[in-house]
Amino acid sequence: MKRFVLAFLFFVALAGAWQLMVQTGRWSPVLLPSPRDVAVYLWSAAQDGTLVAAIGVTLRRLLVGYAIGLAIGLPLGLLSSSVRFVEDTVGVLALGLQTLPSVCWVPLALIWFGQTEGAMLFVVIMGTVWSVMIATDTGARTIPRVYARAARTMGSEGFHKWTRVILPAALPHLITGMKQGWAFAWRSLMAAEIYVTVLSGFGLGHLLHYGRELNAMDQVIAVMLVIVAIGLLADKALFGPWEHFLHRRWGINAREA
């Protein structure tokens, strides 16, 4: 409760300083609108359904691409940690591609898929899969070998060993990789929505793009705040319970998970 009160006071003070800069003329309202203007846009966009529809479209794209990225990255990470050929080929490729900015995938996606949902999905997957793969590989390699030997001694082999011994032991690293993958997926999707225009739905990235085109900074800042809020809620709702579980089950500090 104390942390919540301190955070609330901090953001109130930040908003007050923001309003003061606008009122004193230190920043032009065109470049930096007041908190009131941003709040008015949020209220009007929520009232006419524009904001809610954009959030729904963006979250649908994000969840689908993120799920596919996890489904690809987790097995590849396990293979890379156990098969030398995969480590020397796909593992090295993943290390290089992880450093590639997400926006670099957009031109390739447009050439391959055109102005379609497939282009956005491709960018999100490419932004997710490599970080998840590397985290899974790292987590599997940090497991003490005695665990695998004990599992073999008790008759655990193959799929059973990976699902009942390796994956649970690597779970702290997997959670970290999943959080990183989620962050990369967000960035990738925003880049895709800014540059890819489809008629099947306008997301938050499109609102950012049109706000820039119209020089409507209240819209730009409002959408940015919504993206930050969704990111914080997702962290608490999706990954927070897992971190608390690790803390209770294995005594791992949630800040280190």
Image (cartoon, rainbow, N blue to C red):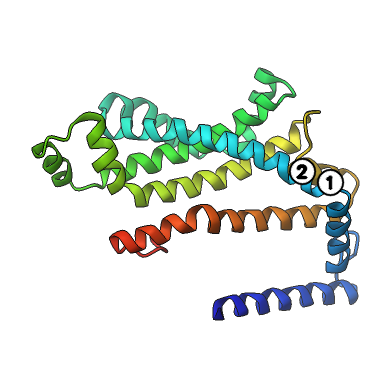
Rendering quarter of residue 76: top left
Q: Is disc 1 surrounded by few (<14), some (14 to 19) or many (20+) residues within 10 Å?
A: some
Mark 2 residue type: Ala
Q: Is disc 2 surrounded by few (<14), some (14 to 19) or many (20+) residues within 10 Å?
A: many
Mark 1 residue type: Thr
C-alpha gap between disc 1 and disc 2: 6 Å
Q: Quadrant of the N terminus?
A: bottom right
Residue drawn at (38%, 58%), measured in percent from left and top?
245
Residue drawn at (72%, 76%), measured in percent from left and top?
12
Q: Position of residue 14 (x, y in %)?
A: 72, 74
Q: Is residue 32 visible?
A: no
Q: Is residue 56 above or below residue 28?
A: above
User: 27 or 61: which is nearer to us?
Assistant: 61
Q: Position of residue 91 (x, y in %)?
A: 37, 31
Q: In this figure, which residue is indicated by the disc labeled 1?
A: 50
- In the displayed structure, does residue 223 sit left or right of residue 178? right
Rendering quarter of residue 74: top left
Q: Please say if the residues under marks 1 and 2 sit with CB atoms less than 8 Å apart.
A: yes
The furthest residue to the top: 112
Residue drawn at (33%, 43%), measured in percent from left and top?
138
Q: Quadrant of the C terminus?
A: bottom left
Rendering quarter of residue 161: top left
Q: In this figure, which residue is indicated by the disc labeled 2?
A: 54
Count of numbered marks: 2
Q: Is residue 242 above or below residue 159?
A: below
Q: Position of residue 126 (x, y in %)?
A: 54, 32
